Image: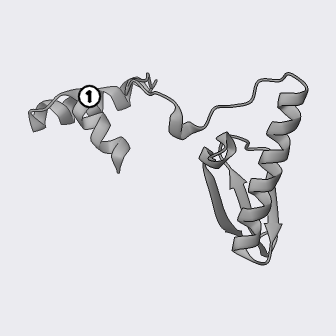
């Protein structure tokens, strides 16, 4: 049986500051687990998230849905300084493509 917490976005990275691996969950940015073993950091942060969700369910709180199961429209608004807007519009015109295509390509880099 796949639990909702199994669908969350987990990551393990090295923390130079702590001198250990840190397990993270994107949906719960305030939770983490440090360990000298990366597999242990992942195992422990997953367990911590599961406990947190169980507590939230018991107290009637709403917990975040996994990023992987959310629907995205592909549209979002980004505000940039006018000079950046002008520069991108010029680049798009010179390249013969839309401003959207230029912005999308730059974001994908």
Is the residue marked by circle 1 packed among few (<14), some (14-19), or many (20+) residues within 10 Å? few
In this orientation, which residue lies closer to the viewer: 108 or 36? 36
Please state the total of marks drawn on the protein image.
1
Q: Quadrant of residue 15?
A: bottom right
Please indicate whether residue 84 sits to the left or right of residue 25 in the image.
Answer: left
What residue is at 38 percent from the left and 23 percent from the top? 75
Residue 3 locus on image (x, y percent): 67, 44
Q: Is residue 55 above or below residue 49?
A: above
* Residue at image location 35% in from the left, 51% down from the top: 109
Q: Can residue 22 be seen in this view?
A: no
**Image coords of residue 102 (percent x, y):** 24, 36
Residue occupied by mark 1: 100
Residue 36 appears in the rendering: yes
Residue plotted at (71% across, 63% down): 42
The single residue placed furthest to the left in the displayed view is 96
The residue located at (23%, 33%) in the rendering is 101
Residue 88 in the image: x percent, y percent? 27, 33
Vertical side of 7 occupied by 99: above or below: above
Q: Secondary structure beneath disc 1?
A: helix
Location of residue 26 in the rendering, given as x and y in whole percent from the top left corner: 65, 45
Which of the two residues, 25 or 79, is positioned nearer the viewer here?
25
Please tell me whether residue 96 is drawn above or below residue 77 in the rendered image.
below
In the rendered view, how is the structure colored?
Answer: one colour
Position of 69 relative to 62 (above/below): below
């Amino acid at each position: 049986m796949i639990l909702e917490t199994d669908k969350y976005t987990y990551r393990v990275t090295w923390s130079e500051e702590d001198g250990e691996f840190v397990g993270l969950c994107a949906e719960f940015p305030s939770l983490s687990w440090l360990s000298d073993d990366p597999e242990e950091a992942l195992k422990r942060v997953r367990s911590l998230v599961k406990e947190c969700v169980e507590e939230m369910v018991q107290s009637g709180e709403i917990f975040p849905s996994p990023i992987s199961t959310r629907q995205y429209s592909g549209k979002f608004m980004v505000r940039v300084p006018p000079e950046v807007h002008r520069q991108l519009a010029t680049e798009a015109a010179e390249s013969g493509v839309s401003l959207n295509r230029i912005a999308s390509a730059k974001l994908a880099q």
